[in-house]
Amino acid sequence: EVQLVESGGGLVKPGESLRLSCGASGFTFSDYSMNWVRQAPGKGLEWVSTVSSRSSYIYYADSVRGRFTITRDNAKNSLYLQMNSLRAEDTAVYYCARGIGNSGTYYADYWGQGTLVTVSS
Amino acid sequence: DIQMTQSPSSLSASVGDRVTITCRASQGISNYLAWYQQKPGKVPNLLIYAASTLRSGVPSRFSGSGSGTDFTLSISSLQPEDVATYYCQKYNSAPFTFGPGTTVDIK
């Protein structure tokens, strides 16, 4: 059974940093791209970032490029999102999602339960 | 960047009704379109990929169609458990933008 478990969310002040983690199990992690998708309270889904299976390709939304860094450790079956210079508008539930596809075309077939990030002074 | 729009933003229909949701891309994306269902308080769930391919285990009352810029998600006979917000997503190239969502409830 595919399982994705996010952790690392919490309350931080504007300008601070946070690192999210996503532990994966139930599939060969190194065979799949991985994604971060967020959802602000009461709002829709926003794609944040994608990393290919071997980290050869990395993509970011304009809203986080230069502030967020996606990484993965295939040996540890883990995905990460380093979030710096956080803003109030980054407040959201952050989902880790497994990616399907290749050559720069990816959609998400399994999602974690999400971790809440709140940016507030 | 390609923009994704959905219509309507919300709808209310009776059990057994046929429901159709439209998703439009501002530029052609071939068939690189996915549909997700998010029930209240739950995690998004993939329904359809490649515009019309039903994910295994998804009820056959769901169907997708379209190519290029115009896509539809249909529910042939609305059930109470279909109350949810439905999102389309383009995935032909980054950014992998989601549509704004369509909320479906029961009349």
Image (cartoon, helix red, strand yellow):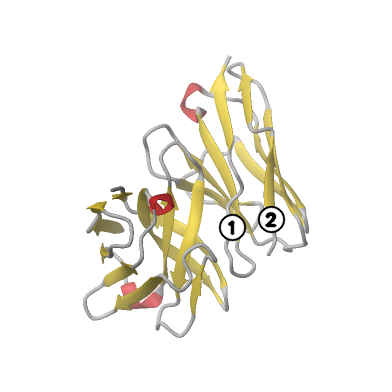
Residue beneath disc 1: B97
Q: Can I make out residue B49 in this image? A: yes
Identify the residue at horizontal 34%, vertical 76% (top origin). Answer: A71
Q: Chain of mark 1?
A: B
Mark 2 residue element: loop
**Quadrant housing the N terminus of chain B:** bottom right
Instruction: Give the crowd class for mark 1: few <14, some 14-19, many >=20 residues within 10 Å.
Output: many
* Closer to the camera in the image, A32 or A114: A114
Q: Which residue is at 58% across, 52% downward?
A: B98
Residue A91 at x, y percent in the picture: 37, 49
Q: Residue at x 57, y 79 (%)?
A: A103
- Which label's residue is closer to the chain start, 2 or 1? 2
Q: Left or right: A13 with respect to A64? A: left
Q: How many marks?
A: 2
Q: Chain of mark 2?
A: B
Q: Amino acid at mark 2?
A: Gln
Q: Quadrant of residue B14?
A: top right
**Residue B49: x, y in percent?**
59, 55
* Residues at marks 2 and 1, CA–CA distance in whole angstroms: 7 Å
**Callout 2 crowding tier (Cα within 10 Å): few <14, some 14–19, many ≥20:** few
Asked if the residues shown at circle 2 and circle 1 are in contact, with their CB atoms under 8 angstroms apart, the answer is yes
Q: Quadrant of residue A12?
A: bottom left
Residue A1 visible somewhere in the drawing: no
Give the position of the C terminus of chain B as an image quadrant.
Answer: top right
The percent coordinates of residue A89 (x first, y second) are 43, 51
Q: Amino acid at mark 1?
A: Thr
Which mark is drawn over residue B3? Answer: 2
Using the image, tell me which numbered label, if any, was put on residue B19: none
